[in-house]
Image (spheres, coloured by chain):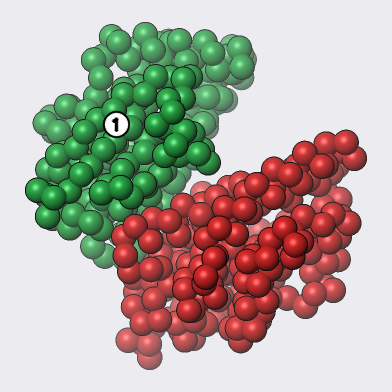
Chain colours: A green, B red
Amino acid sequence: MAEKDEVKLLGIWASPFSRRIEMALKLKGVPYDYVEEILDQKSPLLLELNPIHKKVPVLVHNGKIIIESQIILEYIDEVWKHNPILPQDPYERSKARFLAKLVDEQVLITGFVMLAKADEKGREAVVEQTRELIMHLEKELVGKDFFGGKSVGFLDIVAGSMIPFCVARGWEGMGVEVVTEEKFPEFSRWVKNLEKVEFVKDCIPPREKHVEHMNFMGGRARSG
Amino acid sequence: MAEKDEVKLLGIWASPFSRRIEMALKLKGVPYDYVEEILDQKSPLLLELNPIHKKVPVLVHNGKIIIESQIILEYIDEVWKHNPILPQDPYERSKARFLAKLVDEQVLITGFVMLAKADEKGREAVVEQTRELIMHLEKELVGKDFFGGKSVGFLDIVAGSMIPFCVARGWEGMGVEVVTEEKFPEFSRWVKNLEKVEFVKDCIPPREKHVEHMNFMGGRARSG
C-alpha cells in the first residue's frame, strides 16, 4: 500500500498538535511530505484544505482531507494497522481517549493559557488545579513504561506532544515548577522514558528555540 | 454475551448527551438499567463514578466506568459490533467524528449558549453564525436519508440528540427561527426522517416538557 500512498501533512513546528501527527506517521513508518505553515498567516493551501477551522494540522491522504489532530491519529491507526496506536481492548481505548481529551481540553487550557493570564496571587491556584489534572495521568502510569504499556501509544503521543515538551517548557519560561519528581515520580519517569524514544525525539523541536517561542506565546496570552 | 452483561446508564432526561447513549443502546438492542440523576444535584453514585467531571452520562458495563458521551458511543460500537454506529471506511469515520465534534463544540455553544446571551442586536449575528455551522451538516446530507446513509449512524445520533430536539426547541422558546425548510431543505428532510425512527423517538422527551425546560435553561444562560 505504502508505494501508492500520497501523504501530506500541513503543520507548524511549535504546534504540539502537529508534532503528534508526525510522531504517529513515524511510528507507523509512513513516508510523508511535510509542509510548514507560518503562525498567524493562513496560506491559500491551508484555507483551501481546512476552510472551517483554518488550522493545522491537516493530513491529506490520496486527496482525502482529514482534520483535528486526535481524529487524524484515529484515522492513521485505522488505515495503517501495524504498530497499533490505540489499545485493542474497548475499555482501555475509552480510557486512552478520555485522558487524551482531558489533556487537550483541560491540561493545556488550565496549565498554560490560564497560568499565563493569572496574576501573582492567582498563580498558585492555577498551578494547584493543573497538578490535580496531571495527577490523573500520574495514576495511570503506575507499573508501566508508557501509557500504552511497553510501547508508546495514543495517550503517550497526545500527552507527549504537549507535556513536557510544550507545556513544561512554557512553565519553565514562566518560572513555575508545576511538575516535580517528588510530587510526580511516575510522570517524571515517563518523561524520561519518552525522551529515549527515537521517533518521539525526532518530532520535538530544539529546546532553546521552543522555550523562546513559549515565552513569546505566554506573553501574548497574558496580554490577550 | 448479552445475557451476562450488566449495563447501567446514569443520565438526565433533558440532556442530549444522555439521550444519545440511550439511542445507541437501543440501536444495538442492549438491555440496560437507567438511573435518572437530578439537574444541579450530584448523587453520591455519580460522584463516585465520575469524580473528575461529575457529569452525566456515565455508562457502567460489568463494573467498568466509561465517561464522555462520544467516547461512550465509540465504546458501545466496539463492544457490540452488530448494527454498526460508525461507518466502516476510515475516511468516512473521520468525517463523522469531525462533524460530531463540530456539533458538540460549536453548534451547541454558538446556537444555544451564545444566542441566549446575545442582546437583540447581537442576535442576528449569532443566528447567522449558527446557520453557517449547520450548512456543513446540510451539505453532508445531499442524496442521503441519514448521515449514516440508509440508516442512522454516529453523526445522526450525536446531531439528532441535539438538533432539532434540543437546540431547535431552545430556539423555538427564544422565538428565533434558525433553520427554515427554504434555507435548509436537506437538513429539514433529515429531521423528518429521524422523527420516523422508532428508537430515536423513544429517546426524545415529550415536546412541551422539553420546551419548558429549554426556556428555563435559556433564562439561566442569559443571567449567567
- Residue B2 appearing in the image: yes
- The answer to whether residue A5 is above or below residue A116 is below
Decide if residue A11 is on the left or right side of residue A126.
left
> Is any part of residue A152 visible from this angle?
no
- Mark 1 belongs to chain: A
Q: Position of residue A126 (x, y in %)?
A: 55, 26
Percent x, y of residue B68 = 50, 57
Query: Residue B90: where, in percent of width, then height?
Result: 31, 60
Q: Quadrant of the C terminus of chain A?
A: top right
Q: Report the residue at 52% width, 30% height from top.
A: A110
Residue that appears at 64% across and 84% down? B196
Q: Residue at x 35, y 12 (%)?
A: A211
How many labels sit on residues?
1
Q: Is residue A88 found left or right of B8 in the rendered image?
A: left
Q: Is residue A102 above or below residue A15?
A: below
Whole-percent x, y for residue B10 in the image: 58, 69
User: At numbered mark 1, what does the secondary structure look like: helix, strand or loop?
Assistant: helix
Q: Quadrant of residue A125?
A: top right
